[in-house]
Amino acid sequence: MTELTLDTIDFAILADTFHAPTKGSFEFHSDWLILVDRNGDIAATVDKNQPHYGDWLAAIAAQNKLRTVEKGHYLLPGLVDLHCHAPQWPQAGKGLDLPLYEWLQNYTFPLENRYRDNAFADDIYADVVSTLLANGTTSAVYFASIHRESSELLAQHCLTQGQRGFVGKVNMDNAEQCPDFYRESSVAQALAETEQFVHNVFALPGNDIGLVSPVITPRFVPSCTPQMLRGLGDLVQKYDLHMQTHCSESDWARDYAQSQFGKTDIEIYAEHGLLNRKSVLAHSIFLTENDVAMIKDYQAGIGHCPLSNMYFANAAMQTRELLDAGVQIGLGSDIAGAPVPSIFRAAFDAVSHSRVREDGVNGRIDAALRGEANSRVSYVEAFWMATAGGGQVLDSKVGVFAPGYHFDALVIEPSRDFGNLRVYSDMDSPRDILEKVIALASRENIQRVWVQGRLVRG
Ligand code: GUN
Ligand code: FE
């Protein structure tokens, strides 16, 4: 340890810490020391069994750089929401009895169209970003609306409030599927606006480290013409951009792609140049074996949205198989296809969803035939998807506490005075505590949040 290395350290956190660097397992380190450099990246982690741990601690404390998380509170990586429709926030909890097509036409498109009004958008987008941060979401992948200017306002709110944002101006131009009042005026105009959006987001004042990234966003196959898909694919390739879309989400969406293109969504996206290692494919329920192989080849990733799937997907997600196949996969809230802006809740729902699938639902069928054996997902795997898995999908250094990763983190405070999370130190093992956090932590329990080393909550 030299003075020089310590000089590059902005602060260090001393905390009882959970993270899940490897799918299927977790680590708990009591009194872990995480050194954060001046860029907000992790310079080193030091376990108390390592030699010189005491020297590090003393040296950091002597420089007034030690931040201690109190005993009984826990440090976790910040959560990654791979799929959130920011403009749908006022719609959360409404119309969920409808099938997807009617829900979009009757609720979503009229609401999203209101974001042509920047003042309306500004107020709601400020609240969305702040709500997700309060729920521990440090990285959020947002669909905005078709409007470039207000989509840029969403990106600006991420930057101002300090959230790692991946923001897309939505594209939809198919006159057969999109209402007249909410549709791009032409492919050329939409592509020009999208390219402008990409430039403007990169150039936002204060975005020099790239905290906020533009995302190419074809809404889904039914809403886009082939010309639109091709033009957007060209932008993905030209600037090596993130891409997000809905993939094989429902029977209707899957059948639409087959009837119009004679292909699966994945084949269509690939053919139009839309897939790369930074693509986020929301849902991905009806994948063929070939689709799965293609997703792996492109190193694209899936945003699993378990609660929304229970409303709109018509079938259960093959989460177990995708995890076992080594496909990159994380979690999404899918506001407002599901109403809860929390990735802890998405993790809990991923577990529950898989358990219903495993057992099956029809009590008149013999137990051995009722469900799909061995399809359960564990709490620890769900935690991995909520953090490290999401980071992999984004091709970003987030979700794990390791040198070179961004310091995006939250502190959980269990309490008898608020929320429902209780920890009994004489009865609960680290695994018990982690499972309880996933099942029971709500925003009241999220006491502090950092993104890129900056304290943004608490
Ligand atoms: N498919 C196309 N648009 C949407 C949307 O806004 N939400 C969901 N869940 N699915 C979609
Ligand atoms: Fe969605």
Image: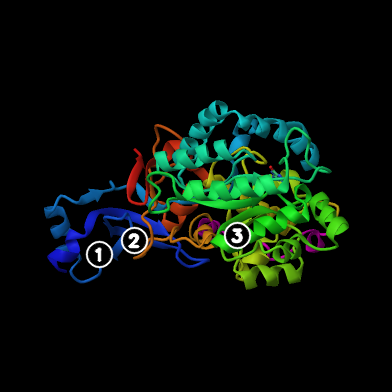
Task: Please give the name of the residue rendered at 49% of the width and 42% of the height, measured from the top-left corner.
Answer: 155
Q: Is mark 2 within 8 Å of ligand 2?
A: no
Q: Are marks 3 and 2 in contact (CB under 8 Å)?
A: no
Give the residue at mark 3. Answer: 236
What residue did someone put label 2 on? 29
In the displayed structure image, the side of residue 116 where residue 107 appears, left or right: right
Mark 3 or mark 2: whose residue is earlier in sequence = 2
Asked whether the viewer can see residue 93, the reply is: no
Do tag 2 and tag 1 residues touch (Cβ < 8 Å)? yes
Above or below, 194 against 6 in this view is above
- Look at mark 1 in the image and give the residue it sits on: 48
Residue segment shown in magenta:
366-385
Q: Secondary structure at mark 2?
A: strand
Q: Nearer the viewer, residue 234 or 82?
A: 234
Front of the two marks 3 and 2:
3
Q: Residue at x 75, y 65 (%)?
A: 267
Which SS class for mark 3?
A: helix
Label for residue 390? Answer: none
**Apparent side of residue 90 relative to residue 152 in the rendered image (left or right):** right
Q: Amino acid at mark 2?
A: His
Q: Quadrant of the N terminus?
A: bottom left
Mark 3 residue type: Val
Residue 354: image x %, image y %? 67, 56
Q: Earlier in the sequence, mark 3 or mark 1?
A: 1
